[in-house]
Image (cartoon, helix red, strand yellow):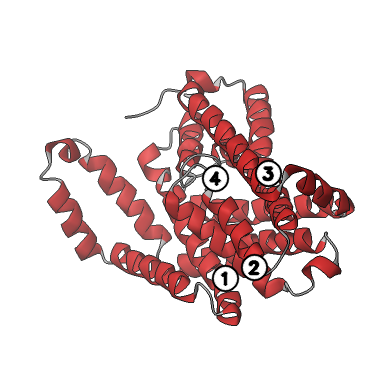
Amino acid sequence: MYKKYRKKIIFSVVLGAAVFLGLSIYANFSELIEAFGIYNWLMFPLVLFLSLCNYLMRFFRWEFYTKTLDIKIERKLSFMIFLSSFIMSITPGKIGEVFKSYLLKEQDGTPVSKSAPIVFAERITDFLSLVLLSLAGALMLGYGTGLIIGFGIFFVILVVAISNKRFSYAVIGFLEKLRFVRRLSVKIHTAYDSIYQMVRFKELVVTIILSIFAWSFECFSFYLVINGFGADNTAHIDIFIATFIYGFATLAGAATMLPGGLGATDASITGLLVVLTLPKNIAVASTLIIRAATLWFAVIVGVIAVMFYQKMYHKNLDEIVLES
């Protein structure tokens, strides 16, 4: 299984290096090094700790979803599976996190079609929570409000559509007229039953609240990154504006479906900071630091978790067979 994704991970690392090179050229490499020199690196451990807090809140959401779907799994094992999926953070739209479903199936036989919709539900609540977090800053800046509201409306309509069984079954019934879809009919119905349970009102409210807390930690860490360059350079960027920039850039990156939002998220963060009159070198340095502390730190956590998972549970991920 793992071999299937190895090339994609390597490609994403190469793409990340290209993004770093492009931003370095944009900022002037010597001036970028100067910006790194004035950054207060004593704040960086706190930034990493806030990323860990984000992961913990998202684990609570994962646990809530597995209980909602009546998937019974020991908590320590569940935590290892959850963290192991972070190695797929640099897949398009994080869709590679369906990796969790294959590990669940390997451990207790839970069908992938039952648990994989958790990844879809996670993305919905991520988007909705980022929309809510970004909106205050967007209104203050008078920038990006229409796009953020548009994102929100799209996902609200999506949730309403999924919550309507009659409509959803009609769509599934129409698709089942296609031969290749008909062969997957049972799995499609299983997947829909799972996602339906996770977007009911109570479940949606609980998971959106957990998602807001989770992403608030990373938005605050971005605020700390910016302020690590000193008040003289960044005094006019408050917590609301920092939250808007990080939330907006994350939404923009996810919308492109690029691995980890590479390029799109980075360019959005840098561009918005420059628009707010930050020097190019500080804008690029802020972008690279926050991306290291969120995206790439998550990948490192995933790599370590995979190593521990294989050792603790005597599994070889290359031997896990993927379903079609």
Of callouts 1 and 2, the N-terminal one: 1
Disc 3 residue type (three-letter):
Ser
Q: Is residue 303 left or right of residue 97?
A: right
**Mark 3 Cα within 10 Å, few/some/many (few <14, many 20+)?**
many
- Where does label 1 land, which residue? 134
Count of picture labels: 4
95 w.r.t. 166: above or below: above
Tell whether label 1 touches label 4 (CB within 8 Å).
Answer: no
**Mark 1 Cα within 10 Å, few/some/many (few <14, many 20+)?**
many
Disc 2 residue type (three-letter):
Thr
Quarter of image, res 10? top right
Tell whether label 3 touches label 2 (CB within 8 Å).
Answer: no
- Where does label 2 land, which residue? 243
Q: Looking at this rendering, what residue extends furthest in the left direction?
A: 177
Q: CA distance from mark 1 to mark 2?
A: 6 Å
Using the rendered image of the protein, determine whether residue 178 is visible from the camera's viewpoint: yes
Q: Residue 171, percent across and down?
A: 18, 56
Q: In this rendering, which labeled residue sits more in front, label 1 or label 3?
A: 3
Disc 1 residue type (three-letter):
Ser
Q: Determine the residue positioned at 66% across, 26% down.
A: 307
Q: Determine the residue positioned at 56% across, 75% down.
A: 138
- Of 236 and 248, the residue lying toward us: 236
Q: Which element is circle 3 on? A: helix
- Where does label 4 land, which residue? 262
Q: Is residue 226 left or right of residue 138?
A: right
- Where does label 3 land, which residue? 24
Q: CA distance from mark 1 to mark 3?
A: 27 Å
Tell whether label 2 touches label 1 (CB within 8 Å).
Answer: yes
